[in-house]
Image: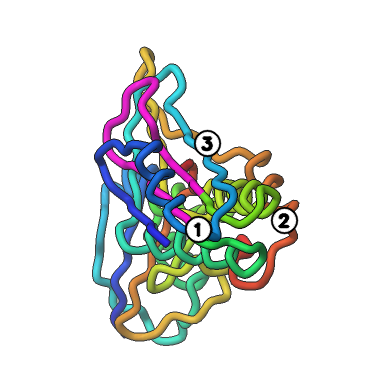
Amino acid sequence: MKILVQPGNFDAGLEIKALSNNPSIGAVASFVGVVREVAMTLEHYPGMTENSIRKIAEEARSRWQVIDCTVIHRYGELQPSDQIVLVAVASAHRGDAFAACEFIMDYLKTRAPFWKKEHAAEGPRWVEAKSSDDDAAERWQLRQGLTQP
Amino acid sequence: MKVTVRFFASVKEQLGRELEEIEVPAGISTVGGLRAHLRARGGRWAEVLAETRRVSAAVNQDMVKPGAAIRPGDEVAFFPPVTGG
């Protein structure tokens, strides 16, 4: 399991290739989040961020047959079309890989301490949390320990 | 007891503060109690930490509910709902 929180970019292709290097792996599902339209600054809570992503990834491993996974999330200044986040999950079969990948992403959006500040033409503004993101996480029927306080 | 309180994102900006060592008065033993104590400072504190505002909290880097206990030396954080990903 590889969890990285970093300002720098990542190469999704290389990360996926690194994950696939195991003969029992038959599927790798991945998601890349990209900055849409407006430049932004991403703030995070060093330490807690890594720990919360690790907990989410461990929860995914307890629910599905996950052989390995990689999560990389950037922080700092990001421009439109920049990559923000990579979630890649390796499994024996696609069903587990797809589900675990989506689960990690849904949870990351509502649990990992990151905050986006958009630099729009009319001035900087903090992005508001969306209730649709809460709903997306809720539908996985949370277990204890990951529920939203 | 003494705790370290950290603020993030819009909460940090609006309070104009990032980190503070606080001597918590006797009788306050929860995160919610600490938030009310800070709110009682009035002005921006009352506004930013108002009960109507969605402010999340963590103790020692774990997200917690307002009823969570605080202990001497804890790191308590207040921040807006997260928006990563």
**Disc 2 designates what residue?**
A140
The magenta span reads: A69-88
**Disc 3 designates what residue?**
A128
Q: In this figure, which colouring scheme has been used for the structure?
A: rainbow
- Using the image, name the chain to which the residue with label 2 belongs: A
Residue A113 visible in the picture: no
Tell which of A104 and B59 is nearer to you. A104
Q: Amino acid at mark 3?
A: Glu
**Mark 2, residues whose alpha carbon is within 10 Å: few (<14), some, or many (≥20)?**
few
Q: Earlier in the sequence, mark 1 or mark 3?
A: 1
Q: Are marks 1 and 2 on the same chain?
A: yes
**Mark 3, residues whose alpha carbon is within 10 Å: few (<14), some, or many (≥20)?**
few
Q: Amino acid at mark 2?
A: Trp
Give the SS element for disc 3: loop
**Disc 1 designates what residue?**
A23
**Mark 1, residues whose alpha carbon is within 10 Å: few (<14), some, or many (≥20)?**
few
Residue A58 x/y as whole percent: 53, 67
Residue A128 x/y as whole percent: 52, 36
Residue A38 x/y as whole percent: 40, 19
